[in-house]
Structures are given as C-alpha cells and as structure tokens.
Image (cartoon, grey):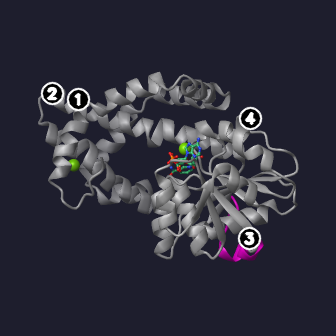
C-alpha cells in the first residue's frame, strides 16, 4: 500500500512567518489561495496586468501584484498558471527571484518532468496536487472537508521539502481527505494517461459513439442523450461509492448480464493495444512535444477540433434537454 498522510502528519507551523505566492487565480489558483488564507497563512496572488481576475482576488480579500513582484516577495511560490505557459513565465518573471531557501511548488508535474523548467539547485521543488477540479477544492474546504491530494518532492535543498509540502497540503485542506506519496514522473504520466484514455478522451468518444449509433438507427436524439450521456453520471456515482460490484448490485440482472457480455466487445484487445501506444507516447515525450509545439503556433489543431466538437448534435440536443432540468446549473 502507498503511504497516506492526514492532518496529524502535517504541521502548519512550518508555514507561519513565510509568505506564500499563488501565481494564477484560475481553477486551482482561486481555490488554493483562499483555502491557504482561511487556514491563517500569509498569501499573495501573482497575476498579469489587466487580468480580469485581479479584481476578483482582491474582492476575496487577497493582496494581488504582478507575477514578478509576487515571486520576489514570497518564500513559497506555487505555480498555478496553465502548464503550456509556465516555462515562459518562469524564465521571464520567476527565475531571477529564486534565491537560496525559497521553494517552488506545482500541482502538476508536466514542466519539471519534461524538462521545461529547470530550477536552481538551492531551492526546494515539490508538488502538491489536489486530485480534483479547483472548484471542489474550495467548496469541500468550506464545508470542513477536503479533496485527496498527491505529494512529491523533486528537489530537497532545505532538508525540509517534504514537511513543507505536507504543511501546504494541510493549508489547502488535502490532508483532511488523505495525501498520497508519489513522484513527479508517476503523477505526470498517470494524469496525462487518465485524462486522455479514460476520463476525458475515452468517455467523450464512448458517449458520442453510443449517441450516434442510436440516432443513426432512427431513435429520437433526446432518448439517445438520456441513455448515453445523462445516465452516465448516475452509473459513475455508484461506481465511485462502492466500486464496480456495487454498481452491478444496484442495476438489474438483465443489465448486468449485458454489461458483462458486451463490454469486452466495445473495449477490445485492439483498444487495449492502442491504450498502450498512448501511454508510450506520453512516456517518451511525444505527446508533450506535440502539445508544446501546438501552443508555439497558436493552437491551429486545438481550435479546429474544439469548434467541430462543440457543434456535435449531442451538444445541441443536450442544451435543449438540460434547459428543461431547472436543477442543473447553466454553463456557457
Ligand atoms: P487556469 O487556466 O484555470 O488558470 C490559469 C491562471 O493563470 C489564470 O488566473 C490566468 O489569469 C493566469 N495566467 C495565464 N497566463 C498567464 C501569464 N502569462 N502571466 C500571468 N498569469 C497568467 O489553470 P488551472 O487552475 O486549470 O491549472 C493550473 C495548474 O494546476 C496546472 O498546472 C494544472 O495542470 C494544475 N491542475 C489543474 C486542475 C484543475 O482542476 N483545473 C487539477 C489539478 C491540477 P488571466 O488569464 O486572468 O490573466
Ligand atoms: Mg491533468
Ligand atoms: Mg436502462
């Protein structure tokens, strides 16, 4: 079993008297900055001039300044900028302020693992990665709970990097739920694989393939939407609560027989072989290079595919159907 850390393993005192800069105020930044502040720590937020989030952070009672100013002032620098921008901002606005004894922190290992950021040897480099979207990091903290997280140390210059990491994890509420020990490599590669093959890429294609099959066979788009997309959450909730067996206990035996007989015809040996290829391309840097180069040329492929995806019939009918479900929050 991997080692798990909880509140009693972490000492917030280690962060008292230190200034923590949270760079970025997006999904993770707004959550981590506010949680740290509510944990009684001294937090500043680093943003670029003209950011619409500047005001938002100030309204939340946080002191906001440019990234460079924040990096200069802080002892602990948490980089919560988009992964594909971090290297450039690091080079221009952070690097020259990394004096001995400071620490830089990440919530995803991409830039360290793929060598885009190479910190000087005299600073601590560690990762505290909530295994959750930022908005839940904030919401669960306010409810007195927290989301699980990962901790990894890349560089321990002070001799206290791990304890500092645990203290940080406590400050954002992760030790309330449990923090797992990992490495930058393991976090980066499993995170990329999960989102590509299973959680995002796998699930969206599975949903669309099921929807398209039903609609092409002449069924109503609304029925296809309910069957292939809406019900997904209800099934996943059961899996999340009690594993595959609990979900199978809850569904009818007819559903379970179909599930066990047909699933392997959908996720075939060929699919599994392709998954291995996807993992190899993550491990050997092929994907990282593709994504970094895509950004270098202002995302032509990303933008073209995203536009096409947004126009898929399931998105059109989905908007209408969700409009009839007043309990669902509207998302633009
Ligand atoms: P977001 O895209 O939500 O937010 C990015 C923030 O960075 C914004 O506040 C943006 O501000 C700011 N920003 C962008 N470019 C610059 C720049 N050049 N200079 C200064 N500020 C800039 O990012 P996420 O919170 O999604 O991701 C942050 C990190 O957390 C990543 O490493 C990601 O992998 C990791 N992570 C994210 C999770 C999530 O839930 N989203 C989950 C776990 C890890 P503005 O545009 O207003 O200037
Ligand atoms: Mg990710
Ligand atoms: Mg059914």
User: Magenta residues, as a range?
Assistant: 1-15
Q: Is residue 133 visible?
A: no
Residues at marks 2 and 4, CA–CA distance in whole angstroms: 49 Å
- Which residue is outermost to the front? 50
Residue 115 is labelled as 4
Q: Which of marks 2 and 4 is nearer the N terminus?
A: 4
Q: What element carries label 3?
A: helix
Left or right: 121, with 11 as reference point = right
Q: Where is residue 316 in the image (x, y as percent from the top left)?
A: 21, 37
Q: Where is residue 151 in the image (x, y as percent from the top left)?
A: 69, 57
Left or right: 292, with 151 as reference point = left
Residues at marks 1 and 4, CA–CA distance in whole angstroms: 43 Å
Left or right: 211, with 307 as reference point = left
The one nearer the camera, 211 or 252, is: 211
Give neighbour class at mark 1: few <14, some 14-19, many 20+ (Cα, 10 Å). few
Residues at marks 3 and 4, CA–CA distance in whole angstroms: 28 Å
Give neighbour class at mark 3: few <14, some 14-19, many 20+ (Cα, 10 Å). many
Q: Which of marks 1 and 4 is nearer the N terminus?
A: 4
Query: Can you identify the residue that label 3 sits on?
Result: 15
Q: Which quadrant is the N terminus positioned in?
A: bottom right
Q: Earlier in the sequence, mark 2 or mark 3?
A: 3
Residue 213 is labelled as 1
Give neighbour class at mark 4: few <14, some 14-19, many 20+ (Cα, 10 Å). few
Q: Is residue 149 visible?
A: yes
Q: What element carries label 2?
A: loop
């Amino acid at each position: 079993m991997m080692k798990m850390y909880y509140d009693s393993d972490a000492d917030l005192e280690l962060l008292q008297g230190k200034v923590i800069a949270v760079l970025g105020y997006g999904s993770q930044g707004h959550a981590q900055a506010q949680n740290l502040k509510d944990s009684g720590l001294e937090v500043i937020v680093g943003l670029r001039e003209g950011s619409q989030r500047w005001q938002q952070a100030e309204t939340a009672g946080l002191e906001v300044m440019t990234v460079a100013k924040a990096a200069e002032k802080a002892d602990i620098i948490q980089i919560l900028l988009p992964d594909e921008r971090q290297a450039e901002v690091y080079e221009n606005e952070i690097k020259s302020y990394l004096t001995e004894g400071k620490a830089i922190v990440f919530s995803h290992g991409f830039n360290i693992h793929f060598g885009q950021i190479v910190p000087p040897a005299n600073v601590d480099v560690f990762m505290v990665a909530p295994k959750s979207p930022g908005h839940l990091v904030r919401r669960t903290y306010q409810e007195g709970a927290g989301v699980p997280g990962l901790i990894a140390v890349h560089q321990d210059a002070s001799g206290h990097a791990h304890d500092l990491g645990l203290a940080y994890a406590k400050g954002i509420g992760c030790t309330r739920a449990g923090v797992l020990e990992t490495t930058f490599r393991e976090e980066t590669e499993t995170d990329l694989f999960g989102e590509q093959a299973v959680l995002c890429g796998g699930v969206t294609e599975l949903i669309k393939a099921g929807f398209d099959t039903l609609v092409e066979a002449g069924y109503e788009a609304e029925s296809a939407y309910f069957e292939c997309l809406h019900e997904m959450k209800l099934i996943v909730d059961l899996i999340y609560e009690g594993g595959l067996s609990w979900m199978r206990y809850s569904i009818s035996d007819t559903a379970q027989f179909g599930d066990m007989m047909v699933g392997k015809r959908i996720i075939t040996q060929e699919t599994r072989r392709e998954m291995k290829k996807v993992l190899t391309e993550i491990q050997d840097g092929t994907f990282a290079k593709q994504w970094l180069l895509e950004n270098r040329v202002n995302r032509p492929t990303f933008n073209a595919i995203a536009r096409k995806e947004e126009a898929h019939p399931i998105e059109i009918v989905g908007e209408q159907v969700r409009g009839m479900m007043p309990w669902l929050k509207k998302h633009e």
